[in-house]
Structure formats: C-alpha cells, structure tokens
Image: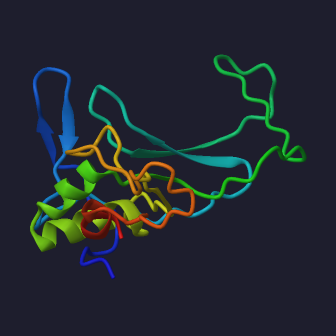
Amino acid sequence: ACPCPPGARPCSPKYFGRDAMVCVCNATYCDTLDPVVLPTPGTYVKYESSKAGKRLERSEGTFQRSLHAPGLLLTLNVSALYQHVKGFGGSLSDAAAINVLGLSQPAQDNLLHSYFSESGIEYNLVRLPMACSDFSVRPYSYDDVPHDYELKHFRLAEEDVKLKV
C-alpha cells in the first residue's frame, strides 16, 4: 500500500534552465493524483502537462451537443469501437533500472507508487528489452555461439537477473 495520504498532492517543481521543469519525487515527498474515476456520460476529465509548467493538471468539462460550438469540434460515435486498449506503461531499460536502484528504498517506493498505484498514473504494462538496448552500459546478448540453433548456450545476462527479473 502507498505510504501517501489519500487525495492529490501537488507537484514540487524543480527547474533546469528556462524551459525545463520536473516534479521532485524523493524519499519524503512525491506528488500524487486522486484515483481515476470514470466521468458521468456527457462529461470528461482531462489531465494536461505543458511546457509552461502544468504537470497532470486535472480539469473537468461537459460535451456540447450543438454543432455550432466555436473552436475544436470532436464527433464521438460510441457505437463504433475500433480497438481494445489493454493498458498503459513504459519501458524498463537497464538505465532505468540502474537509476531506480540507485535511490534510497523510501525514494524507490515513492517513485514506483507514482507510476503503478491508484495515487499515481496507474501504469499496468511494462516493456522489457530483450538483451541489451541503446540504454545499456555494455553490449550483450543471450547466445553468441555461432550455429547454436538448439540454443544450448542460451543464458540470461547479469543485467537481466540484477536489473529486470
């Protein structure tokens, strides 16, 4: 369970130059969101991040049924379904794992809660690169023995065991 109290906690901004800002997440504080709840029919909830400093800023609104509304026109046909979304997530590369494991345990807990918990952005999928990637500290694969078609020399690398599994 998340050690955070219920309810949204605002971003604690840290600025890097003129146009770069991140929300600080450390051992003692991490911003959180209220749990996502489906809006009532005819309404929407929007989360917006911007270069100007918004970080998952929540707002609500209602859909207008008039075709004469100024600005953006969005036509929504709820009877036409095109694809099923299984979830949302990111990639856990060697570099990401090295950075997470370099944090204190409380900071790791806060960071992982900010990604995977109901008070965070609720990731439910993670992609793991097979063998090394552009975000590895060295090149490696699972079987570098030529003509080993039966994969008798297949082995996970140390990075897989320490950083991914």
Q: Quadrant of residue 82?
A: top right
Q: Is residue 33 visible?
A: no
* Residue farthest to the right, as pictured: 79
At horizontal 20% and vertical 22% (from top left) the residue drawn is: 19
Residue 14 location (% of width, % of height) = 12, 40
* The one of 42 and 151 positioned closer to us in this rendering: 151
At horizontal 26% and vertical 45% (from top left) the residue drawn is: 136
Q: Is residue 68 left or right of residue 38?
A: right
Q: In this view, does 114 lie to the left or right of 146?
A: left
126 lies above or below 108: above
Q: Which colour scheme is used?
A: rainbow
Residue 26 location (% of width, % of height) = 13, 60
Q: Quadrant of residue 74?
A: top right
At horizontal 24% and vertical 68% (from top left) the residue drawn is: 162
Residue 73 location (% of width, % of height) = 72, 23
* The one of 134 and 156 positioned closer to us in this rendering: 156
Q: In which quarter of the image is the N terminus?
A: bottom left
* Residue farthest to the front, as pictured: 147
At horizontal 14% and vertical 72% (from top left) the residue drawn is: 106
Q: Is residue 4 left or right of residue 119?
A: left
Residue 85 location (% of width, % of height) = 67, 53
* The one of 149 and 162 positioned closer to us in this rendering: 149
Q: Can residue 78 be seen in this view?
A: yes
Q: How many labels does the image show?
A: 0
Q: Quadrant of the C terminus?
A: bottom left
31 lies above or below 48: below
* Residue farthest to the bottom, as pictured: 1
